[in-house]
Amino acid sequence: MKVLVCIKQVPDMESRFKANSSGNWYDEADLAFRMNEYDEYAVEQAVQLREQLGDAADVTVISIGPDRVQEALKKALAMGCDRGVHVQDPVSSLKDPWQIASIIATFAKDKGFDLIFAGMQSQDRGSAQVGVTVAEQLGYSCATTLVGFACSDGVITAKRELEGGLKGVVKLKTPALVTCQLGLNVPRYPTLPNIMKAKKKEILSIPVADILKEEALATTTSVHPPARKGGGIVLEGDLNDMAAQLIGILKEKTAVLR
Amino acid sequence: MKALLICEYREGKLLDASYELAAFADKLGAEKAMVLIGSEAEVPKVNGTVYLADAGKYGEYNPDVHKKIVLAAVERENPDYIVFVHSSYGWDLAPRVAATLKAAQISEIVNIVDGKFEVGICNSKLRRNVTPTTGKAVLTIQAGAFSVTDASQGVPQLERIDLADGASSLEFVGYEPAEKKDVDLTRAEVIVSAGRGVGKKENVPVIASLAKALGGELGASRPVVDAGWVEHSHQVGTTGQTVSPKLYVACGISGAIQHLAGMKKSDFIVAINKDKDAPIGEVADVLVVADVLQFVPALTGMLQK
């Protein structure tokens, strides 16, 4: 079974963000990048399938972006993927989801992948489009937002997370693409021996211009901080002073303290 | 300008979020038509055309077929915008429709500013204005971002959609109900929630003590539940419970969109966070800028006196 995993490298979401000087994305200076959290679940599920099927499975991991994304690819290889593909694009963050999906679909076309894993969304852009759009472009069956996955004899049983704790179970046949939700599994930490082993694994580099033929379908006109609603009281300073002030406010404004 | 709104229907009921689509279209100033794959008894009470397809025949979740039904309505209505709720149904179906039409998709719209669509990036720490460059565009709106002001009491005009080909690559097996809850947060008057900022499982009792001192229940954000620090039944947010207590205290919760959607209708919101710019500050009535592990014990101690 040929498996492809799509991963993105994103900044640590605990960072402070500001718009870049062109006002079309965030400023990447001083940000620490890591593998998109949703994609860690995708890699883990692919690696578990690899372990289930042994050498009958082969897992390729692909990422699009500047040279730094090789770090994310190396992590995926250390987790257990067999080979990496780096689509070199220094300005991938400015590509819209349609273009990103087109890059992946163009790469995957005619390579006979039976199963493609992706995160359900990226933590930075959060469009939740790329995975499904790749499936559409390839004509693959697709299920999203997985919190449960099983595969046997080319049939995937997928548990989708719906709202309010409800789940929906679906079956689909390969070739298929699934998108992974947080909590699907427990992504492993790469061990030192596996990190060393991963250094020997191949990472194929492809210039983006070789495989992207599509124009963007949407334009970013501005990036800016959210408008402050105002009205909220901000307390800063000494802990006990703040606690006393807060208790005063709660007594005045709510009925829960008397 | 015309908007085709794709309603949501689950377990035999029209979901209320469907009316948020109408609120969005009103704010946009667009003429409305709707699509419901459901039943006649559950048709939304909105003036305008409702394209109705029978969920009994086509399934409640069947994206291959639902895509064809939406496309059939697009063909008849020729809308400028095709609008979904950004939900497990909407984010699943919208890109399928967009890709087939090769239309731009703009996801999880939170606002309309001067005719431009505003969306969040990086956990909503920044906002981005986006404009489609295609003639038609597919939109998804954030749940709860466009509130329904008046009770909709319009009279829809029904148009049936029947497909000749109902083939699907996906088989829907069934629903799995939510795990039994050991706590019903929706009835709590006070909720004190723990977020990633509490650092580790061993610190959760600090937050639970404050909940107890305030006579409330312990809540949690998704990362805390995924990490196994707190049971899922305590999770607040779109995939957990949607709550509106008299007092909500968010401890070390940065305010991801999914969490905000589950608690922003609370009567009074206190946020404790060491990051003054955390998005939770947007909905907080009081923002205490402090380390939760230092401030919460101080507050609890004072309340117990």
Image (cartoon, coloured by chain):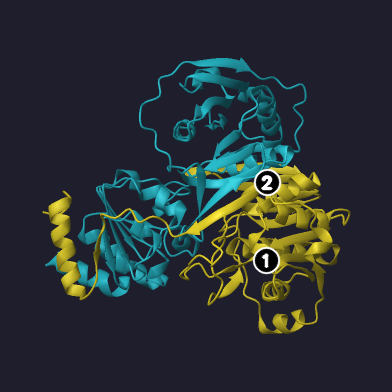
Q: Which color was chain B given?
A: cyan
Foreground residue, B212 or A65?
Answer: A65
Q: Position of residue A169 (x, y in %)?
A: 63, 42
Label 1: state its secondary structure: loop
Q: Which residue is mark 2?
A: A143
Residue B89 as seen in the image, left or right of residue A86: left
Quarter residue A79 falls in: bottom right
Q: Which color was chain A given?
A: yellow
Query: Do callouts 2 and 1 point to residues on the same chain?
Result: yes
Q: Position of residue A84 (x, y in %)?
A: 78, 70
Vertical placement of residue B68 versus A252, above or below? above
Vertical placement of residue A58 versus B247, above or below? below
Callout 2: chain? A
Identify the mark at residue A91; answer none if there is no mark: 1
Q: Position of residue A156 (x, y in %)?
A: 73, 48
Q: At 54% from the left edge and 67% from the top edge, which residue is drawn?
A: A21
Quarter placement of the C terminus of chain B: bottom left
Of callouts 2 and 1, the N-terminal one:
1
* Residue A128 visible: no
CA distance for labels 2 and 1:
29 Å
Identify the mark at residue B138; answer none if there is no mark: none
